[in-house]
Image (cartoon, rainbow, N blue to C red):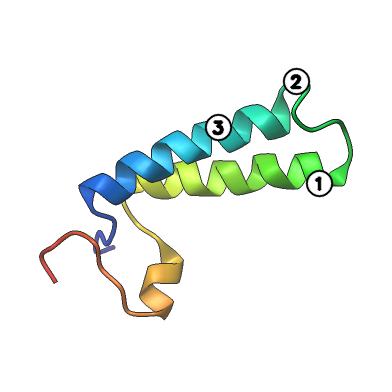
Amino acid sequence: MKKNVGTLDRIIRFTLGLLFMYVGFFDNPIVTGGTFKFLIGVFGTIVFLSALFRVCPMYWIVDLDTTGKG
């Protein structure tokens, strides 16, 4: 797979992914219970994994590359 997530994009995704996973999966006063909280955690996991592997499937769909090589 061709990497399509650049360095700054990766840092932002990593940070937001961890934040959303914390809000979604851990007991905290920001969001209380329910399906919405779980979906926030799932979204955070997807964002975190896209930063980890430097590949974003949505970028392929819209033909976007933030690595600066494309």
Residue 25 visible (yes or no)? yes
The residue at which mark 1 appears reads as 36
Read off the residue under disc 2.
28
**Secondary element type, mark 3:** helix
User: Residue 17 at x, y = what percent?
Assistant: 51, 39
Of residues 56 and 36, which is closer to you in this image? 36
Identity of the amino acid at label 1? Phe
Position of residue 54 in the picture relative to residue 67 (left or right): right
Pinpoint residue 48: horizontal percent, then vertical percent: 47, 41
Indicate whether 44 appears above or below 31: below
SS type, badge 1: helix
Q: Residue furthest left?
A: 69
Residue at 69%, 44% (x, y): give it: 40
In the image, taking residue 26 as reference, residue 33 lies left or right, namely: right
Mark 2 → mark 3, Cα distance in angstroms: 12 Å
Q: Earlier in the sequence, mark 2 or mark 1?
A: 2
Quarter of the image with the N terminus is bottom left
SS for dot 2? loop
